[in-house]
Structure formats: C-alpha cells, structure tokens
Image (cartoon, rainbow, N blue to C red):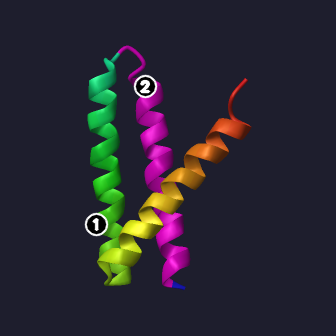
Amino acid sequence: MRITVVSFLHFIIWSGFSIVLLLSDRDKLHYKVLLFFVFFYLAYVIAHIILHSRKKAFFFTIANSMLFFISKLFFFTS
C-alpha cells in the first residue's frame, strides 16, 4: 500500500515538473537541470518519509521518474 501511495505522489510531482517546464520554455538549460534536481529531491524526501528506508526511497524515486519520463516520451511527443 505504501508503494502505491509513493508512486501516486511521484506521478503528481513529475506532472508538476512537466507543467513548470512547459511554462518556462525560455529558461536556460542549467536552470532546468537545477529545477529537475529540486523536484527529484522533493520526490525522494516524500518517499523516504513514507517508506522509512533510504534505499527503497532512492530506488522508487529513480524508477518512478524514469517510468514517467519514458511514458511522457512515448505518449506525448508529436
């Protein structure tokens, strides 16, 4: 049950990240990379609080972020 909650919250976080990137299309690349690390750290902290394990939190943060960006690449590119 905890993994499902973490996956759902990560989906919300990465969707917010996509919206922020959409709104900041004129920003430079290094600002976007910095923004990515801020959202990644936020997702990791939330996973760590819910799962109570650093290793699981890091693994699920990596897995959920990769899954979101791969699905975004396949389904939302034109």
Residue depicted at x 43% and y 30%: 21
Q: Is the Cβ of the residue at disc 1 closer than 8 Å to that at disc 2?
A: no
Picture disc at residue 32:
none
Which comes sooner in the sequence, label 1 or label 2? 2
In the rendered structure, which segment of residues is drawn in magenta? 2-26
- Residue indicated by mark 2: 23
Residue depicted at x 43% and y 62%: 61
Q: Is residue 6 magenta?
A: yes
Q: Position of residue 77 (x, y in %)?
A: 69, 28
Picture disc at residue 45:
1
Relative to 7, is 40 above or below? above
Q: Which of the 4 image quarters holds residue 1? A: bottom right
Relative to 20, is 43 above or below? below
Q: Position of residue 50 (x, y in %)?
A: 36, 79
Q: Is residue 67 magenta?
A: no
| 50 to the left or right of 11 | left
Relative to 30, is 7 above or below? below
- Nearer to us in this view, 8 or 36: 36
**Front: mark 1 or 2:** 1
Q: Position of residue 5 (x, y in %)?
A: 50, 75
